[in-house]
Structures are given as structure tokens and as C-alpha cells.
Image: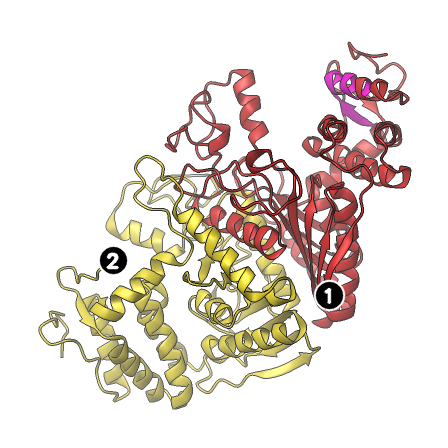
Chain colours: A red, B yellow
Amino acid sequence: MTTQATTGQVLVTAQDLRAALSAILVGHQVPSDQAEVIAELLAEADLRGVDSHGAHLMSMYASRLADGHLTPRTTVTTLADNGSAVVLDGGLGFGQIAGLEAAKLVSARAAEHGVAAVAVRETTHLGALGAYTARVAAEGRICLCVQNGPTFVPPFGGITPLMSTNPLSYAIPAGEEPTIVYDIATTAVAGNKLLLAKKRGDPTIPPGWANDTSGRPTTDTQAASVRHLQWFGGHKGFGLALLVELLAGVLAGSSFGTTERTASPLHGDARIAKGVVFIAIDPERFAQREVFTAAVDTLIREIRGSEPAVGVDRIWLPGEPEHERQKARSRDGIPLSPVLVDELRRLAAAVGAPPLRVRAGDDTAPGGA
Amino acid sequence: MTTQATTGQVLVTAQDLRAALSAILVGHQVPSDQAEVIAELLAEADLRGVDSHGAHLMSMYASRLADGHLTPRTTVTTLADNGSAVVLDGGLGFGQIAGLEAAKLVSARAAEHGVAAVAVRETTHLGALGAYTARVAAEGRICLCVQNGPTFVPPFGGITPLMSTNPLSYAIPAGEEPTIVYDIATTAVAGNKLLLAKKRGDPTIPPGWANDTSGRPTTDTQAASVRHLQWFGGHKGFGLALLVELLAGVLAGSSFGTTERTASPLHGDARIAKGVVFIAIDPERFAQREVFTAAVDTLIREIRGSEPAVGVDRIWLPGEPEHERQKARSRDGIPLSPVLVDELRRLAAAVGAPPLRVRAGDDTAPGGA
């Protein structure tokens, strides 16, 4: 896989992107050590090609910081510690800080107890959950993570918005193969994908993306409502979203459905408070580490080596496309749209931070400084 | 919900069905205490309307017992016990016996440690996984269960059969509301559903059920192959099936993909050995029990009370249709097809066991004794 900047795109290095993002955060009174961590996770998402969870998010964070809804200095407190079960409070600070602390904790507690769960309430946007589960897997543990949020998706068969896109991620350590990292929304697609289709004027969307405002299935892009996203696989995906809501919302002591359990004044579909639950298992309690990771490698290779269906080029494991893109973009640079580069420069200018450096010759952004 | 025997159907009581099933098992040298447990779980599936996992399975069990592939007396041994993490061996006996033992154990260990996982290798067919997770939830614990099996489903995008329908179940204790019980195959449908459509001569099947033998998507019933079942929701369902294979196969030390780790001579798509993993969480480590179960009730009622979409009669929680059917069939009797009644009588006669009793006046089965 190679990275090619399509016409008008700008190539940046991960290092430069991290520096620019960190400077904007510091300009909003985020402590520099925390700013670096947040910037690292955002740049990592762009490196892995998960652009929806990368630098693109900075404008949302900046506006929440400016409005006083997001606490610049994240303080994570422990509400309950029962060894293998811990409840943390993220104090409405950055989800990246609370998420990484929870991931480190669940990994350590799984090492100690064999199986562990860590819940976080009162945290906010975490970006891609796979970033956290992958880090736990890198320490040799199996990790699951679920997260709930604002209410804009109705239950299967209904039209009252009660849940979020309720993502679910898991990661499994392999031996020589890359870590398996699964990271999905339990809705068929994210709301942004439908909004983009509307903006582009696409006449139709695939069946199952979203219903109309009466809850009727539709493939008409304009009739489809972003407040009527559908669950992937119908009732089966809905049942998973419900599990996410029950763990990340109910069990973690966070808001769930229309029940608000947050100090934030932002409620319902404007809610920024999120609940998260991590579960980790130490495979060494079940088998020797080498036996386990070798078997994971065997299964990965068998799946990758499966005969492809007619018209299929390659069979991918979860997380493998992102892993390949990370290698390519680390080498070639991260392609950003001129609009995004412009946005990041405006965000930097607003707080007197230095602008994003782009590679010489690649800076074709209309808003280039 | 009321139970009505459609033309030709036979009504039986759960008690009579249990007695008949147990007698057949005892006739095959299954110890009577174990036979009663197995019969109870099978009759429970029929009571709940999960007919595919009920008395209908007895003919498969009887044939496996007769062929010496299924051990009549199930002996469950402990291979590793690390407190919150336990590995059991089901000795190629009945999955119901090993499954219930594992469920009891994971519940007790979650009570003791907060979070626990129990793996079972070398077990066989367990019936509906929801029966086990529901029992753990009845003791107040959150429970997840996954199971793998014979290789007849290819990975997403491939045509080499490597996995089973890899089911996943969870159950969550509620307060006054019925337990939430989710129990799905990670394939879009079970193979039986496609075979039935072929038998009926249905011209088409819904998109996404199965591909043709080249792995091309199809809605042509005759072209669709039962060895090319598709995962629910495409790559998202495939990723869940992979998690199931990694836990129930790799982690539990069971067979996975084409790697056989079983004493049974039945391999690949004929494999009867199954791996299972239970994970349980005690919600009391996170919140007071009453606070947790009251919040679960609130979410259940909110979902059920959501405004239904046009054309939708009622919004169901996972496990709710089965719960309603169980109430109705406990009162009115279980409707069985004459073919099944006939089959059960032949199975009983073959081992000199008393035949299934049916209600007076309802016995319209062509094979009625």
C-alpha cells in the first residue's frame, strides 16, 4: 500500500501533525503532557487512515474547550476499586486521558487477577476505541471495549432516539502477525457517511443505512434521516448496541437512554458525557503465552490464505487495512485535505500557536499560510 | 400470546416431553440424573419457541450415542483453575452437562472475584446458549457466552470453510422486568433456514443469507450454497465470528479453523467437538444491586415504550418473544409437528422406552401410537 496525495491534498508528517495539534491544545490551557498524549492519539488515527477520528476532531474539541464544556486539565478519580473491578470518573475531561488510564489499569489488573473490568463514567469523546484495545493487546492481554453517548439512534423497530452509534472494539495479541483490532459502530454506518452522501447529492444509499422520519426503510438519500440510522444486521446489531448501553451506560453509572447521570448541562442528543467499559483477559491463565499467540497466528494465516470469492482481491483481518496504511503513511506522509489544513491553521492562529508545517512542494492548500 | 396448534400439530406438556426425552437418553445409557438435565434444557427450548434447539435434536444425539461418538456419561474435568480463570474439559460428553457446570462455576467465581471467565474444551452440542447465560443472570450476574464448532462457513470475502455459525449470547439481570437474553448466530441465518427454503422451492432468498459456490452474492435459492452462508452485517458480523473463534477455539484450547485439537475422530465439517467460553461480571462490584437492576428496568421500559416505526406493532427486547412464548406454552402446551412426534416415538421404541404422551384429542399425528 502506498500513500498518494490526490489532487490538492497536502502531505504532512505524523511528527508535524502531532506538534501542531498539541500546540492548539496547549493554547486552550491543556497541560502540555496531556496535550501530547491527545495529539499522539489523533495523529495515530490519521496515520491509520481512520480520518474521521483524527485531526478532523480538533475543531470540535477547541469549540468545547472555548465553551467551557470540556475540562482542559483531565483529572481521573477512582470511585470504586475492587481489584478486578474498578470504576473511574473522567471529570468531563479528555476521553483520551481517561481512556488510556483505564486501558493501562485493566491490563495491569488482568495480569494480576486473570480477568478484569474497568468502567469510566463522566468521560468525553475518546476517538477510535481500537487505539485503546490495541495497547492492551500489545501488553499481551485480550481486550474488549464498549462506549455509549448522546441519544440520536432509535431502537430497532422504533423512532424515538435513545442510543448513540454505540461502538464496540476488541483486540487480540498475535505472535508474528499484527494484532487483530476490531473497531466498529453498531449502527450500519456513522451519521457522517449519510450526511456526506446528502452533500454530494447521491440519489440513493444502500439499504439498511437509515430509515425515513417515520421509520420506514429507504434507499432515497434525501428521505433518509440521520436521526434514524439503522443497526448493522437489524435486530442482531441492535442487541449488541443494547449490550453496549447496558455496560457503558447502566453498569458504569453513566447516562443511558434518556436518563442523565452527568454534571454536564449538555443532555440528550447534545450530551458530551460518555461511559466506557473495558474488559481484559490474560491468556496466560488459559494456555502458555507462546501456544496462544502461535495459534492466533495460525488462524490469521488461514483466514488470509482462504481462497477468495470471485471478484475479491484479498481477504482482510480486522485492523489489517489500518496496519498497512500506518506503515505506508509513516513512510510517505499523511494526506490531509486543504480544507482540514486550513481549519487547523485557523485553530492555531486563534490561540497564537505555530501553524501546521506541511512538506515543501506539497502545500497546495488554498488556505496555506 | 396464545399457543394454537396449527392443523395437524400435536400439543404436549413440558413435563411429558421431558419424561419422553429423558427416557430415550436413559435407553442409551445416559445416567438418569444427567438425562433429566438434558431433557429439561431441550424441553425448555421448545417451551420458549426455539424449536431448532429443542426435542428436534434428539435424533442427532441418539445417532451420535449409537455410533459411539458422544459419551453417554458426561465427565467434566478441571484442566486449570486460577480462581477467576478456569479451563474445563467436557470429555466429548453432553454439552448441556458441561455447559451448566461451566455456567454455575463462572457465576460463583464472578461473585467471588468480581469478573471471571470459564472455558470448556472437548464438549459437544449445547443447544441454545441463552439457556446458560439466562441462568447466570438469574443469579444476578452479567454473562456472555461464545461457542465455535465444525468448519463450514468461509471468512468474509473467501470461499474456504473455516468456521461455524459461531453463536454469541449475553444475558443481563433486570429488576421487575424479564431478564434480557440475547442469543444469535453470527451468520445471517442458520443453514437449516436455507435448506428449508430449498425444500419448499422458494424462488428467492433475502440478500445476504448465502453466496453461490464461487462466493458471489445471490438471492437465487437454488444457487445459494449452505457451505457459503454469510455473516450478519458483512465484515462486522465476520469480526464477531472471529472473536468467537479466538475465544472458544484458540483461548479454550479447542479446535479452531482447520486445526484439530480433539480426541474425536470427527474433523472439519463433521467435527462434533465444540469450544465454549463464559465471561461473567458481578454488577455489585460497580453499583448497588438495586440501583443496577432498577436502571436496567428503566432502559427496558424506555425501549419498549419507544414510538414504533410505521408498520411495526411492538418493539421487542432480546429474549422477550421467547419469554412470552414460554408463558403461553407453559399454559397451553407445546405444539409439535406430527413428524417430530413420530420421530420421538421411533427413537423411544428403538431403546424400549415409553412413548411420548400427547394430550387426549390432540393426537392427530399420522404416526400416533
Which residue in the structure is indicated by mark 2?
Answer: B1
Residue drawn at x 28%, y 87% is: B351
- Count of residue discs: 2
Q: Residue at x 60, y 70 (%)?
A: B254
**Is A69 placed left or right of B298 in the picture?**
right
Residue under the image location 48 percent in, 51 percent down: B299
Q: Residues within 10 Å of mark 2 (few under 14, many from 20)?
A: few
Say whether marks 2 and 1 touch (CB < 8 Å). Answer: no
Q: Amino acid at mark 2?
A: Met
Q: Which mark is residue A282?
A: 1
Residue A289 seen from this side: yes
Q: Nearer the viewer, residue A70 or B222?
A: A70
Q: Is residue B172 left or right of residue A218?
A: right
The chain to which mark 1 is attached is A
Image disc number at residue B145: none
The quadrant where residue B115 appears: bottom right
In the drawing, does residue A249 fall left or right of residue A13?
Answer: left
Quarter of the figure with the C terminus of chain A = top right
Picture coordinates of residue A207, whole percent (x, y): 43, 32
Magenta stretch in the rendered image = A333-345
Residue B257 visible (yes or no): no
Q: Nearer the viewer, mark 2 or mark 1?
A: 2
**Does the magenta run of residues contain A238?**
no
Please state which amino acid type lies under the numbered disc 1: Asp
Q: Quadrant of residue A70?
A: top right
Q: Is residue A342 magenta?
A: yes
Q: Is residue B26 above or below residue A229?
A: below
Seen from the viewer's position, the closer of residues B266 and B337 is B337
Q: Chain of mark 2?
A: B
SS of the residue at dot 2?
Answer: loop
- The x and y percentages for residue A312 are 57, 37
Measured in 3D between alpha carbons, the distance from the residue under mark 2 to the one under mark 1, in whole angstroms, is 45 Å
